[in-house]
Amino acid sequence: MKLMKRLQSPTPPFFKRLRNIGIILAAAGGAILAAPIALPTIVITVAGYLTAAGTVATTISQAVVEGQN
């Protein structure tokens, strides 16, 4: 299956929820990283991990399609 067709195919409900959670994690991490105030190093590190994990979860969840034979 071609990538564009896969990304445009229907996504199962579980992976839709997982995609939405990934979007929230990535947005929260990005907001913390973009904060105009100085934050402790551990907070910046965790925000980087949140952004990365959210991005990966969103991308993989969007690429999952319902079973096709």
Image (tube, rainbow, N blue to C red):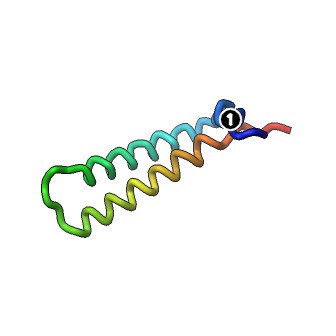
Image point 64% across, 42% down: which residue?
A: 63
Q: Position of residue 24 (x, y in %)?
A: 39, 43
Q: Residue at x 14, y 60 (%)?
A: 38
Q: Residues within 10 Å of mark 1 (few under 14, many from 20)?
A: few
What residue type is disc 1 on?
A: Met
Q: How many marks?
A: 1
Q: From what the image shows, is residue 15 above or below residue 48? A: above
Note whether 45 is above or below 60 in the view shown: below
Q: Residue at x 39, y 61 (%)?
A: 49
- Residue 55: % across, % down: 47, 50
Q: Is residue 56 left or right of residue 65?
A: left
SS class of the residue under badge 1? helix
Left or right placement of residue 57 versus residue 1 in this view: left
- Quadrant of the drawing holding the C terminus: top right
Query: Residue at the spot x=72%, y=37% of the render?
Result: 66
Outermost residue, bottom side = 41
Q: Quadrant of residue 42?
A: bottom left
Q: Residue furthest right?
A: 69
The N terminus lies in quadrant: top right
* Residue 7: quadrant of the picture: top right
Q: Which image quadrant for residue 45?
A: bottom left
The residue most toward the left is: 37
Where's residue 36, x and y in %? 15, 50
Q: Is residue 10 above or below residue 47?
A: above
Q: Is residue 42 above or below residue 10?
A: below
Residue identified by numbered label 1: 4
The x, y position of residue 44, in whole percent, is: 27, 62
